[in-house]
Image (spheres, rainbow, N blue to C red):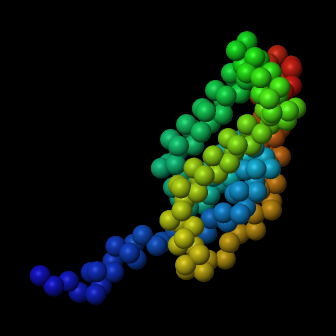
Amino acid sequence: MRLSRDELLQPVLRDTTIPYAPYSVRTTLVTSLAGGPLAAIAIIAVNSLRLGRLARDLVPLALALGVFLGLTYVLAGTEWGAGLRANLQHSGGAHAVAIVYRALAAAFWGLGFVLHSKEQRTADFVGFDRPNGWVVGLACVAGGIMLQIALIAFVSGGVAL
């Protein structure tokens, strides 16, 4: 059986259609590292919404949020977490807990990179104009930092990390 050229190219053409170009990988990385884990989750969710795949990405985003909330509860709301926080600060310095949160944000950025790598390559290959990420990135950074501070204060009973 011999296939025509159109039949051979059809699956490739079907996979390269995305509704809007996602924010660049650089935008998501800078947003994640500057704003922390919640900003990383937010910018990945915005990209998922732009790509029309929010329903498909909801489970990994919910798991990432659960990991962040669990870590925050352990570090700020438990006796064991207080000892862990003290050990981290003793061995890593005053900003060791913040570094742990930034490492978690970088891991979430990696999750977003894996989730949207095909769409990122397609946007680069087709030559889509990327949207300006400053406004959304700054909004995610500001919102992520404020929510993280509020959550830590709530869980720890007013004691900031």
Return the x and y of residue 24 as percentages of the image width and height: 67, 66
Return the x and y of residue 25 as percentages of the image width and height: 66, 63
Q: Split into 4 quadrants, where in the image is the N terminus?
A: bottom left
Return the x and y of residue 3 as percentages of the image width and height: 20, 83
Q: Is residue 44 above or below residue 13?
A: above
Question: As drawn, which residue projects farthest toward the front?
Answer: 91
| Residue 100 horizontal side relative to residue 44, left or right | right
Question: As drawn, which residue projects farthest toward the bottom?
Answer: 5
Q: Is residue 25 above or below residue 73?
A: below
| Residue 101 horizontal side relative to residue 90, left or right | left
Question: As drawn, which residue projects farthest toward the left?
Answer: 1
Return the x and y of residue 33 as percentages of the image width and height: 76, 50
Which residue is pictured at 54% across the width and 51% down the height? 54
Question: As drawn, which residue projects farthest toward the top?
Answer: 79
Q: Split into 4 quadrants, where in the image is the C terminus?
A: top right
Tell me which corner region of the image, top left, top right, bottom left or bottom right, holds residue 148. top right
Q: Is residue 54 above or below residue 87?
A: below
Tell me which corner region of the image, top left, top right, bottom left or bottom right, holds residue 97. top right
Which residue is pictured at 86% across the width and 25% down the height? 160
Viewer-proximal residue, 129 or 1? 1
